[in-house]
Image: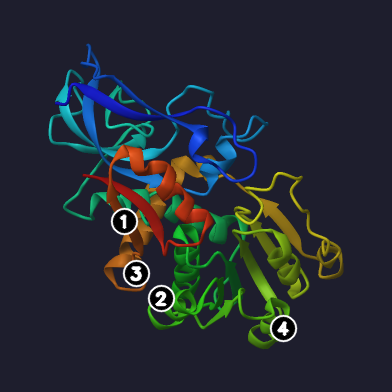
Amino acid sequence: MSATNRQIRLAARPTGDVKAEDWEHRSAPVEEPGPGRFAGRTRFISLDPAMRGWLDDRPSYLPPVGIGEVMRAGSVIEVTASNHPDFQPGDHVVGTFGVQEYVVSDGKGVLRIDTSLAPPSTYLGALGMPGMTAYFGLLDVGALKDGETVVVSGAAGAVGTMAGQIAKAKGCRVIGIAGGPQKCALLVDELGFDAAIDYRAEDVRKALRQHAPDGIDVYFDNVGGGILDAALARLAMHGRVVICGAISQYNNSTPVEGPSNYLSLLVRRARMEGFVVFDYAKRFPQAAQDISAWIGTGRVKVKEHVVKGTVDDFPEVLQMLFRGENVGKLVLELA
């Protein structure tokens, strides 16, 4: 084991875009596991749009990362030493261990994973929080019915790729909104979406009228802003808007833009509801079973964007999310 543990800690609360000086790169001593604890080496770190929200000092579903604290992140760890009865050296586990090379844990909130069934990184994506978010957001919050018309924004991201494919597995017509011709082609040609809208090159409102002439039954929103407004204008009667995220607003230095078309909810007798996936934790095993079955039959394809590097690469890799450079789940694999 290395003599030092490389970590990324929050140095300052960002205003607008996250900058290099908002992070502290630190080396800390490597801890040894005491009784009832295990030690491990980080193999994969999850990068998620929600991380931006965790940096702001404001009320949310989780407390903000504190100044000087190791950056919060989900990761896959390989156990290297253990004084815990449930974990042995060589085990791979997933949990919220933070952006650091080595960890020591008491096992709370930690899940052992089977790397013979799926690659470790998949437990951070399709079989992790993004897959769970898409599953419960569509089926529970969106009350999806077979054969409905579904629109997904941020459709080429970790949650979006899963949401669209799950909707297709349920027999729905699916329209994805993404940035750039390559992402749009991937959605249709590889992931089976019925249509894709390039928000950078097309008039989204006009394209939605074309591809959803009878209206949108479920709009799964990952971006907020003007695209949310465009979708609200095309809701079908009794449509549902699932508020998962708003990546277009996360780096704003001004207040978040609210939807100006919200009266469409009244006219269409529709509803708009937000959710936090942790509320469904007791049902994760069933969701994972369903998603695994869809993957096994080829109805869902796993899309991952794995960047190989070191802990010190985390700040730059995180920016890929906000520049729209990733396709599918973005993961940092530690060399």
Report x, y in % for residue 300: 37, 69
Q: Front-most of 109 and 49? A: 49
Q: Residues within 10 Å of mark 3 (few under 14, many from 20)?
A: some
Q: Earlier in the sequence, mark 4 or mark 2?
A: 2
Q: How many marks?
A: 4
Rendered image: mark on residue 191: 2
Q: Earlier in the sequence, mark 2 or mark 3?
A: 2
Name the residue at 39% across, 39% down: 74
Q: Front-most of 222 and 9? A: 9
Q: CA distance from mark 1 to mark 2?
A: 18 Å
Quadrant of the snapshot with the N terminus: top left
Name the residue at 27% across, 67% down: 296
Instruction: Report the mark closest to the observer, 4 or 2.
Output: 4
Looking at the rendered structure, the secondary structure element under dot 1 is strand
Looking at the rendered structure, the secondary structure element under dot 2 is loop
Instruction: Report the mark closest to the observer, 1 or 4.
Output: 1
Q: Earlier in the sequence, mark 1 or mark 4?
A: 4
Query: Which residue in the structure is indicated by mark 3?
Result: 301
Instruction: Report the mark closest to the observer, 1 or 2.
Output: 1
Q: CA distance from mark 3 to mark 1?
A: 15 Å
Residue 2, compared with residue 247, is above or below; it is above
Q: CA distance from mark 2 to mark 3?
A: 7 Å
Q: Front-most of 205 and 181? A: 181
Look at label 3 and name its amino acid. Answer: Lys
Q: Earlier in the sequence, mark 3 or mark 1?
A: 3
Query: Which residue in the structure is indicated by mark 1?
Result: 306
Look at label 1 and name its amino acid. Answer: Val
Q: Do tag 4 and tag 3 residues touch (Cβ < 8 Å)?
A: no
Q: Image check: 200 left or right of 300?
A: right
Q: Do tag 2 and tag 3 residues touch (Cβ < 8 Å)?
A: yes
Residue 276, compared with residue 84, is above or below; it is below
